Image (cartoon, rainbow, N blue to C red):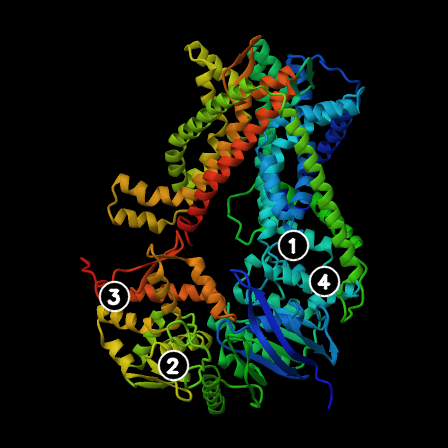
């Protein structure tokens, strides 16, 4: 068998956490990328997609494991790759031309060759006429064209793109997606392999020959899916739509398994040690509103109705599932009796229902118990962060805390003072529904 | 206008600007020669300072050259110190507090060391004294530039760093094209402030008494101090005019064009009317084109020889890392030892002070503290309402900003005598009128910051306050004060630091042949310098630095934290 272009072998990546210790963002990743592939990495927010790409290109060497390029262990930056950034990363003080030339200064080229290359990519991405413009004079789409041109100018074998179209509006993103795909399929550029991170399934299906689905906490590959649709792809073709639907089901299964996540250790109060997804309650309730009529929807349908990216929606659905409002058999999202009850209730009852539910969740119980034990009725944020860091070594405790505070405030479970950084209790859940004049 | 039409017809032709620039170049060369002549002259401790008007241009030139050289040193210091502080691992923990302390040491605290050391080094030439004077101006300029550069370096966007790494920029390339370019805007604004800060102590830096020696260097500062000493009204007026002329000149010829040019480094669209007449002319002139061609040529020459890319690039050898680690430790050891030595020597100096002297110093500190707080409070009283009003109205703030800036860069000590003279006429002593002097010197910082704070209040919030029919009181309590609080705080911090420093010239002055002074730490420092009592001077300077640092840590820092967490406007 021929040596693959790129091989990711047992790569793990840890970063120092906010309150000391480390968070493992990637855990034991294995991935092979062959020539003439377009690989899209998909997954919910915070699953380490971008981290994996940065490890592959050599910007952040992995904590353990290896990246092999044509069978050789890669040390430092890989000169055969170029990166397109989500937020363009252009130097504001350089013109379009100069920005593109930035990537060329280290290559063994004469001045004429350099100029030629710049001119060539400027033509290729449709920037001709804007050579002397500064980035601030350009629209988002034009800026990303500069980002793309800068990457193409070094004539990379592998073009890496980190959510390249997500900072653009829908129409502009559509245009650029088509242009990049044309660039690749028409073979006008030396790029023959593309590795991209995306949070949109349709974008992945539109561009990629292979889709890699990642899950979070710790980040790992959950599923790999080949996409043999011929180019040029039509987003309205039945085959395309069928594939997207199939992929949704696959992702739902991979990232949102039907039964609750298996827990080995029981917490202090006998509750399963379980973190909470970083989603807002308003969005979770919004999902219930959408399910109100049909009672259940395909995740695919839900994405289309909700107008939010799958990576975000997955977190919201997960949150709703954790609160007992929905179940997710296969690729479907089904509203439960509890969900319907919550939806039908008024604001006071909703708060009471949620209050009871949250008391049954590990992270909230953790704080409630700590508050009970505290003589002053207050608990310092640092104490909770420490407990969370120990319970969830793969997550950022501060992030969990932000969600906890938001949910607990809605349910009036306990209060949080952001100036003094302490939690303090409310009198009693029943008495908390105090008469409010407005 | 004829010239304008000419430009529209042939924008690239040599115009009067090019001629002017060439003339300026010639003048510069002449100036350099003159300054060099003065520097290499034999040491005269009390050279004749003339109060005739015809000497003023030359004196102004001397002062300006000192300021420019001091700025050059400030810039170099900023590059080295700021870069090391931001980029050498672990350095920041030591270097940041050190900078904080250095910043709080008043200019006179550096004086004896500089003067005695340099006069000892160059016993027969003026150059020692000149360098000492330049270094004193430098201590009035440098600190805020270093802080600004440091904080810019800390906030370079990580994505741009990634691009620089992917492009395998060399250290120099990365420094110039990324770090320095990113820091340019902040550095420029702070440079303007720094120049003004340097002028503030110009009179002290050019004419001072140290023990038995009366040191004077020909310059605008020494001219002014002689004029004040002799009570020569005409000469004082001429000196003020010369100073104003110099400030306007530097502003129009250096800062305005630079600010206009520096818009290139920001991510924002250039505001339509922020131009500088000089920059508008220069950027259309042919000289600039030649300059940029020259620059490109230079860049091309300095570009590192291209190397073939290798997969195993960037792998540092183990030996290099080790050597670097060793040299770092060595550096820290040397630094640590010299700090220890300095501290021991300093403490030794202090042992000579008697208990009553310490008591006297404490009393003086209390008096000056009171004056400083009073001055800041009084300044706030008028600057807050006026600043808010100006900030609310974009047209006003646009028109007034340059005027205020100019007023702020004028060294207030030069008009102190006028104020004191008037106060004396009303029978008010220096004890009280020095509060007014401190206010004169530091009110601008507050005004500046209030303007910028109030202009950042979103229009929607003003509208809400109107729709909710806020009373006058509610509007201030609920909207204006919380919204401007973070910037007001910055203003207060700068003003207070400045006021402590200014007390040195406000509480002690030579006026019409007599010495006016009052109880205060500033007066104690000035007096100790004049007496050549280094024990007392060391103690007084130490107390002032300690008070400023302690106040910063105990009052301002917690307040700023609160301001940042609670009162920051999210937009």
Residue toward you, B407 or A288:
A288
Q: Secondary structure at mark 2?
A: helix
Marks 1 and 2 share the same chain: no
- Quadrant of the image occupied by residue B27: top right
Tell me where residue A433 appears, x and y as whole percent: 21, 63
Mark 3 and mark 2: Cα distance apart in space: 34 Å
Residue toward you, B270 or A369:
A369
Mark 4: give few (<14), some (14-19) or many (20+) Cα within 10 Å: many
Circle on res. B168:
4
Apparent side of residue A89 relative to residue A407 in the rendered image (left or right): right
- Quadrant of the image occupied by residue B187: top right
Disc 1 target residue: B178
Circle on res. A302:
2
Apparent side of residue A21 relative to residue A423 in the rendered image (left or right): right
Disc 3 target residue: A429
Marks 3 and 4 share the same chain: no
Marks 3 and 1 share the same chain: no
Q: Chain of mark 3?
A: A
Which mark sits nearer the N-terminus, 1 or 4? 4
Mark 4 and mark 2: Cα distance apart in space: 45 Å
Which mark sits nearer the N-terminus, 3 or 2? 2
Residue B257 visible somewhere in the drawing: no
């Amino acid at each position: 068998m021929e040596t693959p272009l790129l091989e990711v072998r047992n790569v793990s990546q840890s970063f120092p956490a906010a309150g000391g210790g480390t968070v493992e963002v990637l855990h034991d990743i294995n991935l092979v990328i062959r020539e003439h592939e377009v690989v899209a990495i998909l997954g919910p927010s915070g699953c380490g997609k971008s981290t994996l790409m940065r490890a592959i290109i050599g910007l952040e060497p992995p904590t353990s494991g290896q990246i092999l390029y044509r069978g050789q262990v890669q040390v430092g930056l890989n000169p055969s790759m170029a990166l397109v950034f989500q937020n363009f990363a252009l130097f504001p003080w350089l013109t379009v031309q100069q920005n593109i030339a930035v990537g060329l200064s280290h290559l063994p080229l004469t001045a004429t060759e350099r100029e030629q290359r710049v001119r060539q990519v400027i033509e290729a991405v449709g920037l001709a006429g804007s050579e002397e413009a500064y980035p601030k004079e350009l629209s988002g789409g034009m800026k990303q064209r500069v980002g793309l041109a800068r990457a193409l100018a070094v004539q990379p074998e592998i073009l890496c793109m980190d959510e390249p179209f997500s900072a653009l509006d829908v129409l502009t993103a559509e245009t650029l997606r088509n242009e990049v795909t044309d660039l690749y399929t028409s073979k006008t550029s030396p790029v023959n392999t593309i590795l991209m991170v995306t949070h949109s399934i349709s974008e992945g299906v539109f561009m990629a020959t292979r889709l890699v689905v990642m899950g979070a906490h710790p980040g790992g590959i959950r599923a790999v899916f080949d996409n043999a649709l011929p180019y040029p792809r039509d987003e309205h073709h039945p085959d395309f739509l069928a594939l997207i639907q199939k992929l949704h089901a696959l992702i739902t299964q991979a990232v949102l398994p039907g039964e609750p996540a298996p827990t080995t250790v029981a917490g202090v109060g006998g509750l399963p040690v379980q973190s909470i997804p970083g989603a807002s309650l308003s969005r979770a309730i919004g999902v219930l509103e959408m399910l109100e009529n049909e009672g259940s929807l395909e995740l695919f349908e839900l994405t289309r109705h909700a107008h939010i990216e799958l990576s975000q929606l997955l977190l919201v659905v997960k949150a709703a599932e954790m609160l007992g409002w929905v179940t997710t058999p296969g690729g479907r999202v089904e509203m439960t009796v509890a969900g319907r009850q919550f939806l039908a209730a008024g604001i006071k009852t909703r708060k009471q229902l949620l209050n009871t539910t949250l008391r049954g969740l590990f992270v909230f119980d953790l704080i409630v118990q700590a508050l009970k034990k505290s003589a002053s009725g207050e608990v310092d944020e640092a104490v909770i962060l420490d407990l969370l860091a120990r319970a969830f070594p793969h997550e950022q405790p501060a992030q969990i805390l932000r969600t906890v505070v938001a949910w607990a405030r809605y349910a009036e479970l306990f209060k949080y003072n952001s100036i003094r950084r302490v939690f303090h209790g409310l009198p009693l859940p029943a008495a908390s529904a105090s008469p409010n004049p407005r | 206008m004829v010239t304008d039409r000419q430009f529209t017809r042939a924008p690239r032709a040599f115009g009067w600007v090019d001629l002017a620039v060439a003339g300026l170049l010639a003048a510069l060369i002449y100036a350099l020669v003159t300054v060099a002549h003065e520097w290499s002259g034999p040491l005269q401790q009390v050279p004749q300072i003339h109060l005739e008007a015809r000497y003023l241009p030359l004196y102004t030139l001397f002062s300006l050259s000192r300021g420019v050289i001091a700025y050059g040193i400030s810039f170099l210091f900023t590059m080295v110190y700021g870069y090391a502080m931001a980029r050498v691992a672990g350095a920041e923990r030591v270097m940041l507090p050190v900078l904080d302390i250095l910043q709080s040491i008043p200019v006179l605290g550096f004086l004896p060391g500089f003067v005695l050391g340099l006069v000892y080094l160059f016993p027969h030439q003026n150059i020692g004294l000149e360098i000492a004077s330049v270094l004193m101006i430098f201590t009035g300029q440098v600190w805020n530039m270093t802080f600004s550069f440091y904080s810019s370096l800390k906030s370079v966007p990580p994505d741009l760093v990634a691009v620089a790494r992917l492009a395998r920029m060399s250290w120099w390339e990365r420094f110039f094209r990324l770090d320095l370019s990113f820091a340019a805007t902040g550095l420029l604004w702070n440079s303007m402030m720094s120049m003004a800060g340097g002028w503030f102590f110009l009179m002290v830096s050019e004419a001072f008494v140290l023990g038995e020696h009366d040191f004077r260097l020909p310059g605008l500062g020494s001219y002014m101090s002689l004029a004040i000493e002799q009570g020569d009204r005409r000469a004082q007026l001429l000196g003020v005019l010369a100073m104003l002329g110099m400030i306007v000149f530097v502003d129009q010829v250096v800062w305005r064009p630079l600010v206009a040019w520096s818009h290139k480094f920001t991510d924002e669209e250039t505001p339509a009317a922020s131009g500088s007449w000089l920059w508008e002319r220069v950027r259309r002139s042919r000289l600039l084109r030649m300059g940029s061609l020259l620059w490109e040529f230079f860049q091309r020459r300095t570009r590192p020889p291209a190397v073939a890319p290798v997969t195993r690039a960037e792998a540092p050898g183990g030996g290099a890392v080790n050597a670097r680690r060793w040299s770092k430790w060595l550096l820290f050891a040397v630094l640590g030892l010299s700090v220890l030595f300095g501290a021991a020597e300093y403490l030794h100096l202090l042992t000579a002070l008697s208990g009553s002297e310490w008591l006297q110093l404490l009393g003086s500190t209390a008096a000056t503290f009171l004056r400083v707080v009073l001055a800041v409070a009084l300044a706030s009283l008028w600057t807050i309402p006026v600043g808010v009003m100006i900030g609310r109205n974009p047209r006003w703030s646009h028109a007034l900003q340059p005027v205020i800036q100019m007023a702020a860069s004028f060294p207030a000590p030069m008009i102190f005598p006028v104020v004191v003279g008037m106060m004396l006429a009303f029978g008010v002593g220096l004890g009280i009128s020095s509060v007014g002097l401190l206010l004169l010197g530091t009110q601008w910082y507050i005004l500046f910051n209030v303007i910028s704070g109030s202009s950042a209040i979103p229009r929607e919030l003003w509208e809400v306050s109107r729709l909710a029919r806020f009373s006058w009181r509610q509007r201030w309590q609920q909207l204006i004060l919380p919204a401007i609080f973070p910037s007001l705080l910055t203003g207060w911090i700068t003003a207070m630091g400045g006021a402590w420093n200014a007390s040195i010239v406000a509480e002690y002055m030579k006026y019409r042949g007599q010495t006016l002074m009052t109880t205060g730490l500033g007066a104690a420092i000035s007096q100790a310098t004049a007496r050549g009592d280094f024990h007392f001077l060391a103690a007084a300077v130490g107390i002032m630095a300690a008070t400023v640092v302690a106040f910063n840590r105990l009052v301002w820092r917690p307040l700023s934290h609160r301001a940042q967490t609670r009162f920051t406007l999210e937009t």
